[in-house]
Amino acid sequence: MQELVGRLTALDPEASESLKVVTYFDTLVTAGAGLDGVVRGAAALSGAVAGAERRGRVTRRGPDGARPPEAPDSPRSPQRECSVGSVWLERTGEHHANDEMIVERLALAVDLIEARYDPVGALETTIDPTRSREERTTALARLGIAPGSRIRIIATGPDARPGSAPSTAVPTRHGLLR
């Protein structure tokens, strides 16, 4: 990859910067960075405040990595939707050359992080009798549960509001249970 960046820099410096953005986010995600880490990375790369809204919770970081003061009227530009919310840079004036690429890669990173840590998907896999033993064991590990551990499952009606624990709807002979 470094050789490719070197060759591309000689041909087109702007294209090589985009490739560096892609490589940077790929490295963060591969290393297991969480939401805060990728938002900090976007802020550092762009030199602007970066933010992500995931399931109603907002995370914002400045270029120095610190939490910036609340600014509800800050422009969210550029902005991109992702599977669980949206991501953005808070830039006033002209966008920089790689702002769109940074936001695109930030959105992809948030989606990958979400897929990695999706407790509902892991719970559904764990209790699905059609899945293989290996798939179910892997899903248990994603939930932080060792195979053979004793766990408690509480069945409620389908209209019950899930608490802070992972939940899923399961069809049973008694009807749909959550």
Image (cartoon, grey):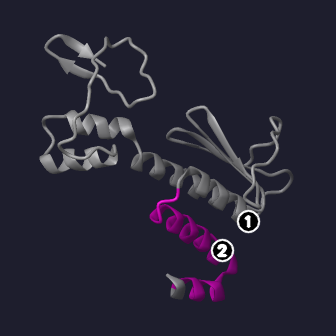
Q: Which residues are magenta?
A: 4-33
User: Residue 98 location, x and y as percent?
Assistant: 69, 64
Q: In the visual, does 126 lie left or right of 6? A: left
User: Residue 60 location, x and y as percent?
Assistant: 70, 47
| SS class, disc 2 | helix
Q: Which residue is mark 1?
A: 97
Q: In the visual, does 135 lie left or right of 83? A: left
Residue at (24, 23) in percent of width and height: 170
Q: Nearer the viewer, residue 120 or 104?
A: 120
Q: Earlier in the sequence, mark 1 or mark 2?
A: 2
Q: Are marks 1 and 2 in contact (CB under 8 Å)?
A: yes
User: Residue 178 location, x and y as percent?
Assistant: 31, 19
User: Residue 71 location, x and y as percent?
Assistant: 82, 39
Q: Which residue is mark 2?
A: 17
Q: Is residue 79 visible?
A: no
Q: Which mark is residue 54?
A: none
Q: CA distance from mark 1 to mark 2?
A: 9 Å
* Residue type pointed to by label 2: Glu
